[in-house]
Amino acid sequence: MISKRKWVAGGVVALGTLVSLQVGAVSTRSFVLDDAASLAEGDLEGVAVHSEGRVTAGVSVRRLELPDVAVAYCLARAPDGATYIGTGNGGKIFRLKGDSVQEFASTGQLLVSALVATGDAVYAGTLPGGRIFKFSTRGSSRPAKKPGPAKEADGGDGSQTEFAKLEGADHVWALAWRPSTQTLFAATGPQGQVFAINRNGDEAVVHDSAASHVMSLALDADGVLYAGTSDDALLLRIASPSDVRVVYDFPGNEVTAIAARDGVVVAAANDFPKSTVSTTATKKTTAVAKKAQKAGKGELWRIGRDGRVERVYKNDSAHFTAVQIGADGTLFAAAGSNGRVYRVAPDRTHATWIDVDERQVLDMDLVSSRPVFVTGDPGAVYRVDAARSQNAQWTSKVLDAKFLSRWGRIDWRATGNIEMQTRSGNTTEPDETWSEWSSKTTQPGPVRSPASRFLQARSFLGSKASLRAVQIYYLPQNQRATVHSVTATIHRPTAAKKAKPKAEASTEYAIEWSVDDPDGDELRFRIKFREERQRQWRDVLEPHEILTERRYTWDTAAIPDGYYVLRVEASDELVNPEVFALRASAESEPVLIDNHAPDIDGLAFRAGEVRGRVRDNLGPIAKLEYAIDGGRWRAFFPSDDLLDTREEQFRFKPDNLSPGSHIIAVRAVDSGGNQTSAELTVGGQALQ
């Protein structure tokens, strides 16, 4: 997002998303990135973006390859320091020791979706099929044998067994180990159950929820189990099968991750566009899993020791896949849609802490002595070094000037050592057609990239540097407006409610037109007219009139009757120097201007008939009517029954004339709506 501020000498002032030094004109404009949202939209390599709007060198990360792994979905840290990583689509488990990654075991399933490591074993939940496998970690670091179709003995040296097949479950979403009772808990779907499995593999349902899936589990220091559900996004506290209560009903539709520490519980509540976790994974999919779906919105909620529930962080562009609590209360949240990890301090300030190329950070352990996290799309494991990155690099999002632009000066506000460079191109995503990165500069100055539509800035930060704002000036190429749909209709003022509209025609015409204005300039309009058979244009407006509205009321009282063509011209001269100003125009279809009523002459009454003639300058005559003694108007036709010329003869016999004297009125209306009337008095004897 471009910040809603304009940079001026001595500070900033609220203005708008796209800043222009001359408001409303295609003049010098600028991109301003000076808040956390705009600074975090780009690529972050070894940098952190803080909520108060600054970029600093962040932690350093090292990527360790997981060959042929589509998704590294979960991890578990063993007491000996080894990290076990569950993956898909081959259902393999890898072991990380130091910087060495080796295949530890294979479950033969599609995805290892949950892991727990105890002192002597690793438990792996899988999908589909709702199975839990147990792998021994005693006595060897050699890779385990491949599992067979039947159970194997649970010996040492990495041997494996199918520990449990959970009745009615197809997805095992989370596992939790309670050492005091040697109990393994499993969160499952699609029946929304929590299972307890003892050391012998005997299972029992400790909670059968109304949700379709229980997505997450966490145990507090007292061994009390917390569970998060899908559908209604409930956080449950399960003290025993008979003691289950709802801690909180969160907004959204899924509590994906839970962490508990020192009496504090943190829940990640996500709001997805639609529920997707109930889709059974098949081998035709690429790891159908709760953490690898379309991006949702994520919120972090903290439940304190006193039971107070507070939202501490919200992200409308990413959902959360894992959450942890540090010893000092700092929260870490992994995002499943933008490859990032967020850090929330106890004072609620937050930062985009880690950014990697993979789309999903799916699980993490960032609070131990050797932090690590895993990713999906594709699968990888990362080591995190506590020291500040020595290669901190911030790259802005692609900045869109909308049109071909000349780049001006690049400015920034920062402390410490900063190097800046730019590149430009004409495609929405940088490719081989873009320019190379410009040479680095340590001082604000001219952008050293060619004119184009798109631009990116890149900054290299020293270990103590802090970048707070970047502003890049540019001049877009002026764009011509397009005028179309010019019309003119008789302007009839709205009649008062319940009042009869006036019958007489108006000499005012409403001229209207549409304009497509690509760069949003303020436009000046000029209107001209000509009789359709002539070539000379005449001005509708006075020379001093400046029309900016896209409508004009034209009084045609002094215009001879006839057909006229209107031309509307649009110019952006009000906001551009004459040399840059552009004009465009469009013409209307011929418009009938008819302000004069027809004439009725020769009106007479002979042999019981009313006779006469009506003539109009333009015609045709549109309607003929008569009325007797002020009564209602009745239509009649001309002598040839056709109203198709500007002159019509008529003769008609009035209906229902009673004996006596009468006044007969005749009214004629032309096609322009102009009307005239005439009357004659007839005596009773003549009617006989």
Image (spheres, rainbow, N blue to C red):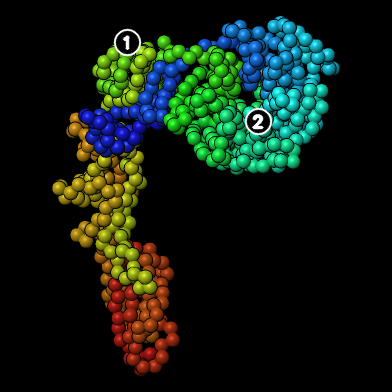
Q: Secondary structure at mark 2?
A: loop
Q: Quadrant of the C terminus?
A: bottom left
Q: Circle 2 is placed at which residue position?
A: 222
Q: Give residue 684's position: percent from left, percent from top.
A: 35, 93
From the top left corner, tell me how far across and down residue 21 is, in percent.
24, 32
- From the image, state whether disc 1 or disc 2 is nearer to you: 2
| Sequence-first disc among 1 and 2 | 2
Give the vertical position of 22 relative to 65 (above or below). Answer: below
Can you say which quadrant of the picture contains the N terminus? top left
Give whichever of 6, 174 is nearer the camera. Answer: 174
What's the CA distance linking mark 1 and mark 2?
Answer: 59 Å
| Residue at 30%, 66% in the rendered image | 505
Q: Nearer the viewer, residue 282 or 658?
A: 282
Q: Which residue is mark 1?
A: 439
Q: Quadrant of residue 647?
A: bottom left
Horizontally, residue 116 falls left or right of residue 327, namely: right
Q: Secondary structure at mark 1?
A: loop
